[in-house]
Image (cartoon, grey):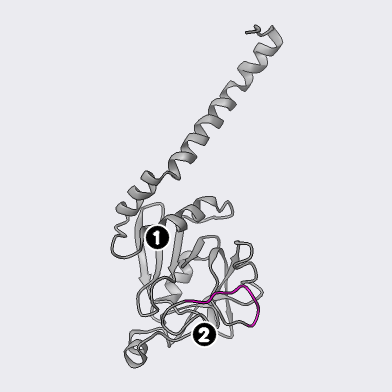
Amino acid sequence: MRSLNFKNKGLYLLLLPCLFFAKHSNAESLKKTSNSHIHQLYNDIHLENKLSFDAFKKGYLAYEATSQKKKEYLTIVDYSMPSTEKRFFVIDMKTHRLIYRTLVAQGKNTGQLEATHFSNQQGTKESSLGTFITANPYHGMVGFGLRIIGLTKGKNTNAYDRDIVVHGADYVSQSFINDHGYLGHSWGCLALPLNSYKNIINTIKDGSVIYSYS
């Protein structure tokens, strides 16, 4: 092996902390995304019999991959569950706690009870899948709402232009389910119960991750 001259040795010593940090950082990243680590998180948050491991794993990996996030909250919408189930989960990733679990509507043309059709296109009145980042709250036609920006190419990148938002609706309730056998439908928005949507919006607004799964 060729020995280092003084100049190269000095450069090597200068770069050594950087090389160590890069190696350590990569190891930490691999640990965070390992199956065993994700399983441990899933158990710590007590999600068994509430949210499938596959839905949590994909949501968590999306959360870790989203560099734009500014808040340590992960919202998972599990469209593999029927609309009569509480399938909107807000997780505090700092304290590893499930802080909200509630009903959420799907798009009118996504399906009556089961969610089977999804779209990224204008005018479809269908829900979208993939990773979103929350933007700012606003007051509009639906009242108090939260804009979201789609980050998954081909699946939800038109969400902002489609006016896909988080808002409250009177058709998102147990009484509606009791009367009809399914939850009311939005035009693609994440419509939540009137008694909780404002608190949820104020928690997840301004830079948290939402992951829609099916």
Q: Position of residue 192 (x, y in %)?
A: 44, 78
Identify the element where label 1 is drawn: strand
Left or right: residue 85 compared with residue 62: left
Q: Which mark is residue 9?
A: none
Q: Quadrant of residue 141?
A: bottom right
Which residue ends up furthest to the front in the rendered image?
Answer: 116
The residue that mark 1 highlights is 91
Q: Is residue 70 above or below residue 174?
A: above
Q: Residue placed at 63% from the left, 17% from the top?
A: 12
**Residue 85 at what x, y percent from top left?**
35, 76
What type is the residue that disc 1 sits on? Ile
Query: Looking at this view, is 195 or 120 the one in front?
Result: 120
Residue drawn 56% across and 24% down?
17
Q: What residue appears at the point 42 percent right and 79 percent down from the top-left corner?
A: 114
- Residue at the spot x=37%, y=67% of the render? 100
Give the x, y percent position of residue 50.
31, 65
Q: Which residue, as the protein is rendered here, is positioned at the far right?
A: 7
Element assignment for label 2: loop
The overriding secondary structure of the stretch rendered in magenta is loop
The residue where tag 2 is placed is 108
Vertical arrangement, residue 200 with respect to residue 38, above or below:
below
> Mark 2 belongs to which amino acid?
Lys
Q: Quadrant of the N terminus?
A: top right
Q: Nearer the viewer, residue 130 or 103?
A: 130
The part of the chain drawn in magenta is: 116-123
